[in-house]
Amino acid sequence: MLDSRPTHGLTPRPLSLTTGVGELVLTRGTTVGCHPAEVAAAGSVAEQLGGVLAWLQQALRPATGLPLRESDQATITLGLDGELGPEAYRLTVTAGRAVIDGGSAAGVFYGCQALLQLLPAAVHRRSPVAGQRWAIPAVEIFDEPRFAWRGAMLDVARHFMPKHDVLRFIDLMALHKLNTLHWHLTDDQGWRLEITRYPLLTEVGAWRRESQVGATRDAPGDGRPHGGFYTQDDVREIVAYAAQRFVTIVPEIESPGHVQAALAAYPQLGVTGQPLDVDTRWGINRNVLNAEESTVTFFRNVLDEVLGLFPSRWIGVGGDECPRDQWRDDPRTRERMIELGLTDEDEIQAWFIRRLDDHLTAAGRRLFGWDEILEGDLAPGTTIASWRGMTGAIAAARRGYDVVACPDDQVYLDYRQSESPDEPIPVSIPLTVADVYAFDPVPAGLTAEEARHVLGGQANIWTEHADSPRTVDYLAFPRLCAVAEALWSPAGGDYEEFSRRLGHHLTRLDALGVEYRRAGGPLPWQRRPGVPGRPDTRQQRAAHIARLVENIAHQGVS
């Protein structure tokens, strides 16, 4: 437990923190290094921790202006301790030195993040800070995460985010000890990943002629073309950059719905085969993939290139919000159902997802999909993203599937943040920092065995109404800080205590240039006056979600 003395604004909250006497002051003579005598099965500590050590030097040097040379008798020493959990760390600071031990390089990295948080917030600035005394209070911290999957979903399909802003977002995730970026790369409104076998996916599918402004059905378009995509070299760079910060990127390629950008590039993939534009409107789109074997082959070929770019164990295939009406009304699809032995349109989606599932399983990967895919038969290794409340999490865990909890009514960070009319394009229900802090990925009612299927959770950041990284900042922070603590720290945290620490943590975000939402509401330039939203009450939203999950609500119940 934490002692009663100050916790130095550490976020997430550590398991154990004991303050000592004195402080370690960083000077031009301060050195860094790894335990020289330790050798682990995977090689020397220096070999395993060299990347973390280089990262720490790069993190400390700009603001402090200190050389921080390497030494065998270092002031700040990194090491491995096989008795610690893989992501656990122990940080000990005295007046003479700081020692960071971890169960793996990831644990040491998180210990380094804690060390940075013990320094003045100005350490996060990118040029020398004059007159600052760089003192670290004497302290001993032990910490490890509650969940292995601590994530954020970033939608770059609705509004493209340039590479340097994606890298910045990864840094902000790492600051908060989040370790999984679910990267939503394709949708009706844009295809953002270069696929060399199918170049039209980005030549055509990455660009739309305009974007809807507002959340109502009659909202106007802005008349401004929008687009962008990541080359495969960009992706390799981003994946490597994230790995250096112990963030795994889980890519998502939507199917069999949310595919109009792909259909604009290759109309033969669709049910009608008719030419289409990349969609300019938000919401659920009726244009879906056909059930031809050639279309399955197309998406398997796409996934093969995805597998070559992303080493993640999990690969996302979407599976959400797929209307059935085109399949129902199409004579060729009805013929195809007879050929496949399918009895209704719902089985088409299950058949398509299972074909991709088999392909990923054969490649040694695991399919990751939204909770709608529970409507069909899935391979044992499938992992479910439960977004329509916690019903999907319960159903999946009871059926023996792993779960990542991301319920919309708790961690959808595109939802409005208050009842204030000043909230920009207010969508759905209000989710305050306090609401998000109360998130627990493990739903009530599961047995201990079922609960073990909950890998963790993530916050989802959809960008229909976030047309710039500045707006993503406003939507994500500080609510993502609360999510990070809910996923790292033990259940049952004290929000008032968190709020006090958050006040200090926000000075770090200030130094980093994060344009977070202030407690008093949006700043003038963060508002969108005159642009209509689509607010719901909690009762309206709960009733809507209950209707959506009726067909999976009783799965796994004996």
Image (tube, helix red, strand yellow):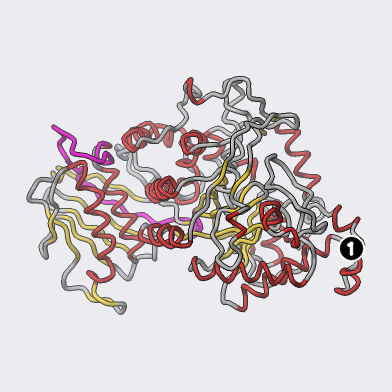
Residue 439 located left or right of residue 298: left
Q: Under tag 1, what secondary structure?
A: loop
Residue at image point 72% right, 69% down:
296
Screen quadrant of the C terminus: bottom right
Say above or below: 315 vs 414: below
129 inside magenta stretch: yes
Residue 209 in the image, given as x and y percentages of width and height = 63, 40
Residue 105 in the image, given as x and y percentages of width and height = 33, 64
Q: Is residue 237 visible?
A: yes
Residue stretch in magenta = 122-150
Residue on which the image places disc 1? 344
Residue at image point 54% right, 56% down:
456
221 inside magenta stretch: no
In the foreground, 229 or 27:
229
Identify residue type, mark 1. Asp
Residue at image point 28% right, 53% down:
112
Residue 182 located left or right of residue 509: right
Residue 207 in the image, given as x and y percentages of width and height = 60, 47
Residue 438 in the image, given as x and y percentages of width and height = 55, 41
